[in-house]
Image (spheres, rainbow, N blue to C red):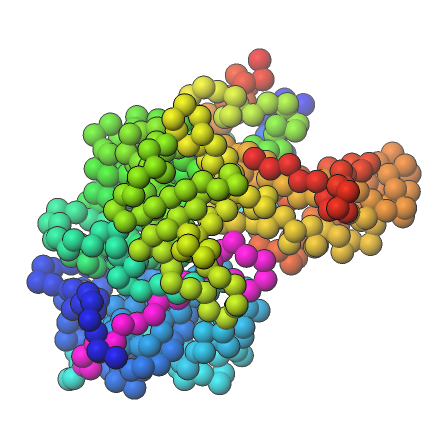
Amino acid sequence: MSVKLTITRQMEEIAQEHGKILAPLRDDLVLLDSGLDSLGFAVLVARLEDKLGVDPFTASEEAVFPVTFGDFVKVYENGAH
Amino acid sequence: MARTEAPALRQCIGPAERFLFDRHTRARLLDLTDGTSLAGRLAELAGKSLLVATSSQLTTALALIELDGIARRLTILPPDIDPGHFAAIIAGADIDSVVLDRNSPTNTAFERLGRVICTADVAPARQLPAPSRITEWVMLTSGTTGVPKMVVHSVAGLTAAFSQRKIDDDVVWATFYDIRRYGGLQIFLRAVLGGTSLVLSSSGEPVVEHLERLGRHGVSHLLGTPTHWRRALMSPAIGKISPRYVRLSGEIADQAILDSLRKAFPAAVVSHAYASTEAGVAFEVRDGLAGFPAEFVERVRDGVEMKVLEGSLRIRSPRAATRYIGTGAALSDGDGFVDTGDVVELRDERYMFAGRRGGIINIGGLKVHPEEVEAVINRHPQVRMSLVRGKKNPITGAIVIADVVLNETGQKSETSDGGRDLNRVKGEILQHCRDVLPRYKVPAAISIVPALDVAATGKLVRHYG
């Protein structure tokens, strides 16, 4: 499964668990408009570490704050290498 | 009792034109000098113990300004509190009447109390009673299992960190916090005493709109938890604000978030502060580095003394709460030191925060006792025992995860059906957690493990830090 698809699946699952409605995940979607809140993203990062074996936010020396869904996927695609 | 110390909040208003803003409306503070948001019922509330259960921060702010110096005791209900605790809070704080607003939910626990409605519209009042007493302010803690602890403060103690009253003409305060919790209440009082406007947060407001609103009001001083700030930095609207003063508190401020904020606001002072509902504001760190200099502990600074005992930070301070109510527990030790429960480690002449003693997990400023979550998980018929712990997280500082040991019935599902039953058990446990716990306490992940370490004392071995 591609990194992007894994992220999409996880976001859908978390939105459902948290009773949130997920916006269509286009690359230019602003993450904060996706329907997930801080707690939702915290869970997402934890689950993705499980699935993809990497937490690029903690691994990176410098803090990264992705703004769009596309940015977020890129952080993981780069982190997975 | 005659007032002897600082003026009551209403007496601090004016002469400058200042406002409280929320998402929908604003309140002109000068209107309160000869007006009321409580339908002129102030006189009958004199000397009463009141529960402030207003649904919006704006009406809360107005009620608090009016009632300081009038009521005997003001107990402030934080948002998201479990209504199941209302009866115990009302009994513990000896509540006479409840202050509500139009949108406050009804609750049977309020039925026997007097009711006062607070509105955001301040109406002219013919005659207002003069403040005549020192009101007790009661805050509720977030870090307890069961009924929150009720912590008694005075305005003098709450505002001791900024006691010199000077009017800041070009300052506009704002906070991501809710003013019904300690961190936010500090800023509310600072704005009122400092004669500045204050922009309140509104629950449910999208981050972009909130940041745009802060920018529009020219907010110069902005405070929040590291989690609040990380969320703001993820917003395309971060450029809408240009604060001169940025402060973090309520959670461990790591170097990454401090560096990111300095980069985002190069002209601003970026500081982090340490405060707790019980110990009050202890110190502020302005050197841009995580942790705090060891010399803070060796000296008395602004009347605040600190020591590290058995690994945790202890504070003796004129800003600390005076006592708990509704419990026999002591707030401080015999010498007047409050044990914060925050574990610190000395590295290179600097103390670094290493988490909470007792394994308490801090999720974006909200505290979770592992035992409370474990109790819920352990109710599942196929669970023998569980261990809940925090896992470091780059968004909220930490997140809750659980290790679960199944009993004989549960272990059968482990071996049968290629693990599909196991996923069902995990799903059931999580669903049960979601049904009875607030969202931040629900484990983000559950691992089924063969065993957990049990110490000779018969207690689970918990690894902290």
Looking at the picture, tell me which residue is in the foreground, B323 or B180: B323
Residue B238 visible in the shown view: no
> Is B107 positioned to the left or the right of B16 in the image?
right
Q: In the image, what residue occupies the spot 52% across and 68% down?
A: B327
Q: Position of residue B62 (x, y in %)?
A: 27, 68
Using the image, determine if residue B293 lies above or below residue B22.
Answer: above
Looking at the picture, tell me which residue is in the foreground, B146 or B128: B146
> Is B182 positioned to the left or the right of B46 in the image?
right
When asked about the image quadrant of residue B322, the answer is bottom left
Residue at the extreme front: B335
Q: In the image, what residue occupies the spot 32% across and 74% down?
A: B118
Q: In the image, what residue occupies the spot 64% across and 23% down?
A: A53
Q: Position of residue B135 (x, y in %)?
A: 30, 72
Numbered range of the magenta stretch: B128-148
When asked about the image quadrant of residue A64, the answer is top left
> Is B99 positioned to the left or the right of B36 in the image?
right
Q: Position of residue B218 (x, y in %)?
A: 19, 45
Using the image, determine if residue A32 lies above or below residue B326.
Answer: above
Residue B65 visible in the shown view: yes
Q: Is residue B164 magenta?
A: no
